[in-house]
Image (cartoon, rainbow, N blue to C red):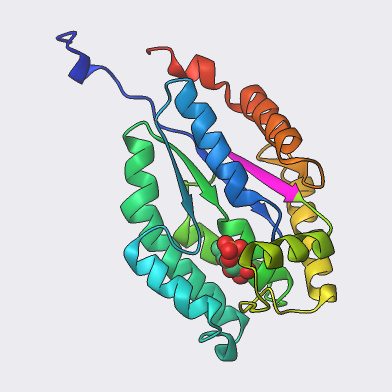
Amino acid sequence: MSGEPTDAPRRRGRFITLEGGEGAGKSTQAARIVAALKGLGIPAIATREPGGTAKAEELRAALLAGIVAPLGPAAEALAFSAARVDHLDRKIKPALEEGVWVVCDRFADSTRAYQGALGHLAPQLIRAMENVVVGADRPDLTLMIDLDPEKGLARAAARRGDNSVDRFEGQSTAFHRALRAAFVKIAADEPQRCALIDGARSENDVAAEIWHEIENRLDPREWRRPL
Ligand code: TMP
């Protein structure tokens, strides 16, 4: 060991995902997490799915325009997974390897909930796809932001400022209620990885609970200490 800083072992970054229904406040909270991490001197980036890379953003536009929908939920799950492969290979994995924390607005649990649970796909199919696409790169922490879908959809509409809806926002209230239940079930089934966050409170209160979970589960102050 030369003792030069460039030879210092680099600690892998942490991978945090935010999940939940429409208008739950995920992107706002992702930006706040990144700001809080940077405040501790931890390098961090916010990204999103589908998207995060040029090719994945192209797939996002097609998916949200409903171009893949007529092919059925299995084809949609494959298309979301294709976007995920590019996002993982070109952005998420390189960042984690460089010691950057990655905060991602939606990830594989959205495929489980939207295409798997709501598309009535066999759980084995979703699991197999996830094993191939995500493999060992599962999130260290998933924040499930839980919110009454009527409130969430109203927030999403207010944010857009018009009556347009994308492929999934335009679904029935029953769809969004079932979606909420699917996310809550994922959190209940994997409590080690997932924290269920009450998204009905103020932005500041939600941010405080999220930060409490990050501190308890990932110990960012300890991570910062040199190895
Ligand atoms: P949003 O990120 O603006 O919420 O838009 C993404 C939409 O795509 C949202 O309706 C959820 C949906 N989606 C899936 O159906 N499957 C997936 O795997 C992902 C990542 C998103």
State the image coordinates of residue 141 (x, y, percent, origin top left).
60, 39
State the image coordinates of residue 88 (x, y, percent, origin top left).
40, 54
Q: Is residue 41 left or right of residue 5?
A: right
State the image coordinates of residue 67 (x, y, percent, origin top left).
51, 87
Nearer the observer, 79 or 221: 221
Q: What's the magenta bit mostly, secondary-structure-wise?
A: strand
Q: Is residue 113 visible?
A: no
Nearer the observer, 98 or 20: 20
Q: Is the residue 105 above or below the residue 225 in the image? A: below
Q: Is the residue 154 above or below the residue 184 in the image? A: below
State the image coordinates of residue 105 (x, y, percent, origin top left).
55, 52
Please give the name of the residue rendered at 50% of the width and 70% of the height, measured from the top-left corner: 80
Q: Quadrant of residue 89?
A: bottom left
| Quadrant assignment for ligand 1 | bottom right
Please give the name of the residue rendered at 85% of the width and 74% of the height, measured from the top-left corner: 174
Where's the N terminus, which quadrant?
Answer: top left
Most extreme residue toward the front is 161
Please give the name of the residue rendered at 79% of the width and 60% of the height, measured from the top-left corner: 180
In the image, which residues are magenta?
A: 140-145
